[in-house]
Amino acid sequence: MSKLNPHTSDELVSLARGYCDERLDAAQVRRLEELLRNNPENQRRFIGYLDLHARLCWEARSGEPILAEPNVPKPTTRRTGVPRAVWFSAAIAVSLLMGFAWWTFRIHPATPPMHAIGLATVVRAVGRWGDDLETIRPGLKLENGVFELSQGVVELAWPSGVRMILESPTRLELVDHQKVILHTGRVVTRVPASGVGFVMETERVRLVDLGTEFGVSVGLSGATDVQVYEGAVDVYSHAFQGNVSQDNRLSAGEAYSFDKTSRALPFAPERFLRTFPKTPRKTKTELAYNRSEIEMIHVRRTAQPPVIDGNLEEWDLSEAFTAACIEPYAATYHAQGMIRYDDQRIYIAMHIADPAPMASMTDPEKEPAFFWTGGSVVLRVGADNQLGWPLNASKPGTPLRGRQRDPAKDASRQIVHIGMWYSKPQEVSQLILQYGIRCDEQVLASEGWQGAFRRDADGLGYTLEYAIDYELLHASPPQPGDVWASTLAIHWSDQDGRTCMGRLLEITHQSQTPFRTFDAATWGKLVFDP
Amino acid sequence: MEFPSIVAGNSRSQKGPVKKQCQVLGLTDKCLVERRDRLCTDRNTVDVDQQKHQRFAELFVRNEAAVYRYIVSLIPNRADADEVFQQTNLTLWTIWDRYDPDREFLPWAFGIARNESRNFIRPRRSRHCELTDDVIAELTERRLREQEHLVEQQEALNDCLEKLPSRQRDLIHLCYGSEASMKVVAKQRGQSPDALYKALQRIRDLLHDCVQRNLVLASRS
């Protein structure tokens, strides 16, 4: 570098320097304009100098050292379709990935994951990300790290041509241009010829794409379902024994579930969302959601058990709690609810305003972890006064903020996620019970409960009524004065009953923010009255 | 109107979704055929839409660095340019379907970037030394005409950056990568702002000369 000539200080370059540094006064700007006007050669030189400045800005946006180390790979051809700046930046990213794990595993960035130099671009989105539910907009660049899709649906495009559709809730870790780790959630990936070799890992398997379209879902326990629509995928197990074909290759029309063992699944085309859903105009960029305002619900003892028929006449609606999504959705998406108890059962009644009522097409037998996507009500409880409030139970990886983990509570099967919805294809009310803060065990209950739904006459809402035996909650009848930690989630779907279009969270610990579904310390409480 | 109460119970069906829909509605096989036809038509429309969208996404990824450079030429302050770039990207993605694939992408994208930078500068005019519209128009045209040359220049710059001593590289990183103002950076380094600006200008001049020399050498080889 020392041999280079440092002297380029003619008037134009001098003014260009000042322009880059924003240090020109009005007279100098006028002089610069004179030099540039109708003078192609000066224009060329000026643009050249500014582009040098722009390039340094561009590189600096990545927040990394301005230049890669000497082993930076370079494109083999002189010019490719993609500007070298992009490749160059990618090379920096890759080399740093190898050397600085702290950068690679930056979890939950404090600011939106938006950088000029990213691994993937959001090309369509109706959703929110992260604990603070930031709106996701098309054009966001995702760098490496964990992308947590809290609500909605997002489509990602990779420079290699790989496309992904993510359904919330999904935790996807972007490792590099060739690899992602799906921690939980549902993703459909389309890999063109230019992207062959793309790798997706889950807790159970490593999938190497051979140019295909395939869907993957990962539950909280890590259990992984894979379904191949086109082409083929090579599957490498981290540890399972089962009957996946010997060459470890899944081809179009095949579906497998990988957990402690592997097993074939019936191929179900509708299992995954393969195309970005058309959304109602008003939800084009916004999702219905709310700000929780209720911490405590009083649960009255009832002398006379209600008739479970979806008719709330015997309930005193004046005592109901109410919750609504924020404007402009409050009028369309809101809820009223009541909970009662006696010595046999707990009773739940709700009216939900919903423009797509009782539309769920989800199949809990095929996809128990995603029953809620078609619209549902989920009440979560710590069904024992002894568990206390706030309830110190959370899934691994949750920030504890000074708390000590309580393994007994983390493992308690009295923490129950009660999922209630109406199955449109089966024309029945459904109840799923997921036990433990991590939902380690789940039961699609057929006995010990009653449930009924009733559609509003105007088709813009529904009523639900449930009675659930304590036995199903591994609980004893509560006594007056008992407190159960609890929280409520209401999910709204699209008209097709497949995609969650919004969510309302209520009954939350108001001083514990942000709310986390799988951190019971952020839940509110049910107080049992006489 | 009387609504039936629906009490828990299971009756699983394994039939396809279209058939289920029709059965739920009490419709006939004719309905099945019609609905399938409609699904096919919808799917074809979606395919065309998706192809167009995919083409747009490719063009966007391929050209975003050029758009960024253009924005910096209008707004040389990095933080401000970043903001305009972000807004430009959002606008591009919002109106992507208005892009005519038979036309060049960059002129269209530059037009949007220009509008966004105008919107950004308007309320901040006092602190921005904006060039007049006619000069910007000439520079935009020149940039579009010489895009190929500008890309070559970026490639030449890679080699020059590699040759830059680490001390100077660190200085660039500090000045360009920091959110702090040059005044603050200068103070941290125990320098006057003028000295820091000059040091930075020297580095840019070195890189500029290096790029020009590499381009000349490349044209001879």
Image (spheres, grey):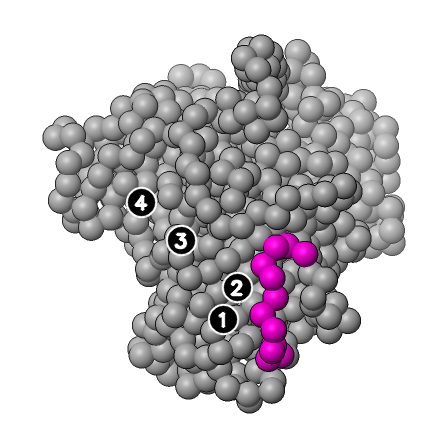
Q: Are marks 2 and 1 in contact (CB under 8 Å)?
A: yes
Marks 3/2: CA distance? 13 Å
Looking at the image, is mark 2 or mark 1 earlier in the sequence? 1
Marks 4/2: CA distance? 33 Å
Marks 1/4: CA distance? 35 Å
In percent of width and height, residue B36 lies at 55, 14
Q: Quadrant of the C terminus of chain B?
A: top left
Q: Are marks 4 and 2 in contact (CB under 8 Å)?
A: no
| Amino acid found under the numbered disc labelled 3 | Ser
Residue drawn at x 65%, y 21% is B105
Secondary structure, mark 4, is strand
- Magenta-drawn segment: A300-311
Q: Quadrant of the N terminus of chain B?
A: top right
Q: Is residue A305 found inside the magenta-colored segment of the image?
A: yes
Residue designated by label 1: A345
Instruction: Tell which subunit mark 1 falls on.
Output: A
Q: Nearer the viewer, mark 4 or mark 2?
A: 2
Q: Quadrant of residue B44?
A: top right
Looking at the image, is mark 4 or mark 2 earlier in the sequence? 4
Looking at the image, is mark 1 or mark 3 earlier in the sequence? 1
Residue designated by label 3: A446
